Amino acid sequence: MNSSLSAMNDRPGPPSKRRRSRGSRTKLLAAGGLVAALAASAVVNHRRARRAENANPPVGRFLQVDGVRLHYLERGSGSPLVLLHGNGGMIQDFLSSGLVDEAAKRHRVIVFDRPGYGYSDRPRGRLWTPDAQADLLAAALRQLGAEPATVLGHSWAGAVAVAMADRHPGLVSALVLEGGYFYPSVRLDVLPMSLPAVPLAGDVLRHTISPPLSRAIWPLLMRKIFGPERTPDKFRAFPREMALRPTHLRASAEETAMMIPCAAAAQGRYARLRQPTAIIAGEGDRMVAAKDQSARLHAEIPQSTFDCLPGTGHMVHHTATSAVLAAIERVAP
């Protein structure tokens, strides 16, 4: 009797139960493998970020403004000229273009790493809208004694430049708006590019998948932002790996997510601007349609000029540096 009971207990369970058990073990192993792969990727990305910083130390100085550490570069003398890079950029964007060296022959050029880019902080307790960045940078310029200043904003930073002129009119003597985004539009790229900004899930993405994925699509991105022209050789001086750090990717994703709603909220301020304004854009811009954005803004600001450069893309300061310099000189005091 006892031996019969023992034999019954040793028999394997029903086939369906055995299959469920094997399926559970497979799922656990897969989940464990995924976690291990993500952890390994995070370690690799952390090391690459540290190597990038070691290879590209700060090129300028630091300033504490409202509890935020800002990295900035200053060159030349004369009337102040402030250069604000676009989404994903940093000081080296303007440096590698040659615009800084040329403009410094006549101006006191100040270039900022905007919050979260390069070596500037981006505290998580604030929503870094164009208005918030405008107030921060205005306070920085007052600390530096660089007022009034001509402010150039490229791409996303065009909204920051406009906000500075509107909120701090005594600080901004003139505006140069290059390839800016000023009016809401349908953008299919916004959702996927905003994912690294999502709390928790975005943090995982930024430290694991986003850096290698961004590295893989980098050539396509360069063709888009520089097209229809080729990427100039001088852009090789731009430190790509610095732009693929998790902190940098967070700033870029957050600004992508804010792009359309911030443009919608800002439309009422354009008619209030009183500063001389030079608007410049590439006719072949594949990132921001010049006729839908820059040309429309020109029609709304009576005291503006507009240069739409044929055969030129989004990175006008790289591919038509002299045209940007001419735009600066048209409005700068």
Image (cartoon, rainbow, N blue to C red):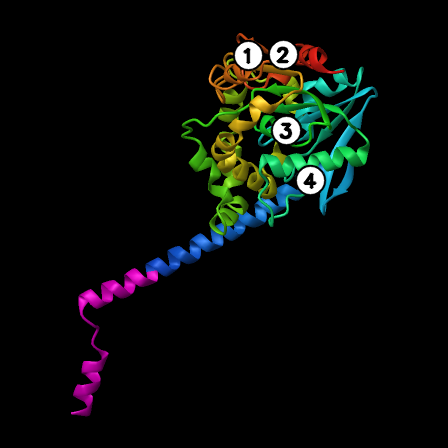
Q: Could you classify mark 4 by the number of other residues whose Cα lies within 10 Å: few (under 14), some (14-19), or many (20 or more)?
A: many
Label 2 is placed on what type of residue?
Ala
**CA distance separating discs 4 and 3:** 24 Å
**Which of the two discs, 2 and 1, labels the residue nearer the N terminus?**
1
Question: In front here: 226 or 110?
Answer: 110
**Which of the two discs, 4 and 2, labels the residue nearer the N terminus?**
4
Q: Are marks 2 and 1 in contact (CB under 8 Å)?
A: yes
Q: Is residue 27 left or right of residue 64?
A: left
- Which is the main secondary structure of the residues drawn in magenta? helix
Which mark is nearer the camera, 3 or 1? Answer: 3
Question: In front here: 210 or 284?
Answer: 284
Residues in magenta? 1-25
**Which of the two discs, 4 and 3, labels the residue nearer the N terminus?**
4
**CA distance separating discs 3 and 1:** 29 Å
- Determine the residue positioned at 58% across, 39% down: 251
Label 1 is placed on what type of residue?
Thr
